[in-house]
Amino acid sequence: MLSTCSLDERDAVLAARLFELHGVFAITLGVVALGHIAAAVRHMLRKDGIVRRML
């Protein structure tokens, strides 16, 4: 049977680093998503046809 031991029980340092890295990637993904949304809104306000071409 497989062990259900969690990562932090085996190596607390590695678990802490992975948790921190996960947070960094989550924040980065959020910033990129917000940037894309802001760019789309900018193009909608400028009415330059970019949004129409994307859809």
Image: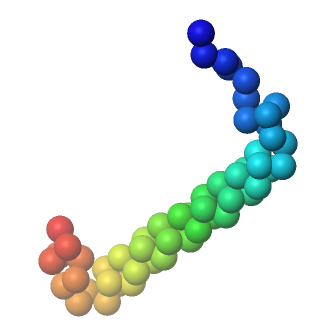
Left or right of residue 35, residue 10 in this image? right
Q: Tell whether 36 sits left or right of 6.
A: left
Q: Quadrant of the N terminus?
A: top right
Residue at x 20%, y 73% (from the top left corner): 54
- Residue 37 location, x and y as percent? 43, 71
- On the image, which quarter does residue 25 sit in? bottom right
Residue 23 visible in rendering: no
Residue 20 lies, in percent from the top left, at 74, 57
Question: Relative to residue 9, is residue 16 depicted above or below?
Answer: below
Residue under the image location 68 percent in, 59 percent down: 21
Q: Which sits in the foreground, 44 or 18?
A: 18
39 up-or-down from 25: above or below = below
Q: Position of residue 3 (x, y in %)?
A: 67, 18
Q: In this image, 53 relative to 31: left or right?
A: left
* Residue that appears at 73% across and 29% down: 6
As drawn, 50 above or below 28: below
Quarter holding the C terminus? Answer: bottom left
Q: Is residue 55 above or below residue 41?
A: above
